[in-house]
Image (cartoon, rainbow, N blue to C red):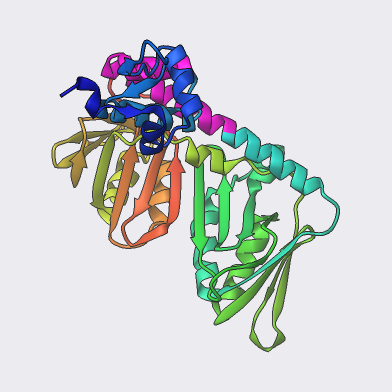
Amino acid sequence: MDDTDALMGIGAFARRVGLAPSALRFYDDCDVLRPAHVDEGTGYRYYAPNQEARAVLVRRLREAGMPLLEASVVLDGTREEARVLLEGHARRARETAASARSAIEEILRGLTGPRRATARIGGAELASAVRQVAPAAAAAPLRDEFPVLGCVLIEVDRPEVRLVATDRYRLAVRALRPSSGEGEGDPCGVLVGVTEIGDVASWAMRQPELTVEVDEQGVRLRGDGGAARALRAVDGTFPDYRTVLDGLPATQHRIIAHRAALRAAVAEAGHDGPFVLRTDGRQLTLASRAAVPAVVPAHCTGAAVRIAFDPGVLLPALDAGVGPDVLLEISSPTGPVVVRSADQGSFTTLVMPVHDSPDGRA
């Protein structure tokens, strides 16, 4: 049997791997995907079955927007070279997408016509969200210098109502699901003062359900029987929290501990300033200059890590959680730490660590 009997013509191969024949000819010219055989008389290209995996990988790399020179390294370089290039390309793609989204949102904000969105949510849920998110807003004097950091961002974006606050050292995001399935109107967000929304939360707690109306003027909360409250919009541009969340590096260390036990240890270790947290198998050790080291049972995955915190930043994140357990996701000793609760996936807090001094104490 002729060896070419098992080969496929360029048209059949193109259909099998999802590439156009013109693309296959281009990749041949670029030495990226050479045919297994070329008929000397007709110049017709033939491809072998064992070339399918490479062709599919070429297609996927090009669909991801990877330049051809980089794609060639992924195809023919070492695994480490491929990993470095792919991670770099993914990072640039996220940055480009974030820039495009920011530009589009700015253009949308400039379009004529009022924007308005509504959603129906539980009053107790809203009050709970305010309790969790509001502590992350900045206090004076930072709030006086940057007024938007003393606000809570309220967004109605179809499937969710989100409350967001940050003081640049921590970020809190709580997502609520509308009881009617999804919000109505255009995606819309508005800043309101943290003090004002805190006052309204007590009233919301007594309402079985609320209609949340958001527009450029502010937020109106309408309860049953005609009861209503209004929150005036605060001018300013809130930090792009989505870019922060989307850009989080991969988690390298996970810590699961009893929330109350960890909180007590943090309060004790950090009563006179920052402290160092170290993982060691199935326990955490918290140490500072002023306190005897405290040990907290925990389930730790990943390599051992030491990381320093300001208790004034970490304690509110622990207090805002729900349920007996808390999960800390750490990418590095200097990157933001994600604080989660196993009982509430709709609430996320990010806290920034502080500098770990060379003498082993924060």
Q: Which residues are magenta?
A: 68-96
Q: Residue furthest bottom?
A: 225
Q: Look at the image and say whether residue 70 sits in the magenta stretch.
A: yes
Judging depth in this view, the residue of 359 and 16 nearest the camera is 16
- Is 319 on the left-hand or right-hand side of 141? left
**Residue 294 x %, y %:** 21, 41
Judging depth in this view, the residue of 225 and 102 nearest the camera is 102
Q: Residue furthest right?
A: 112
The chief SS type of the magenta part is: helix
Q: Residue at the location (33% across, 36% down)?
A: 251
**Residue 106 x %, y %:** 74, 42
**Residue 111 x %, y %:** 82, 49
Residue 357 visible in the picture? no
Residue 186 visible in the picture? yes
- Name above or below for residue 26 compared with residue 173: above
Q: Residue at the location (15% across, 24% down)?
A: 1
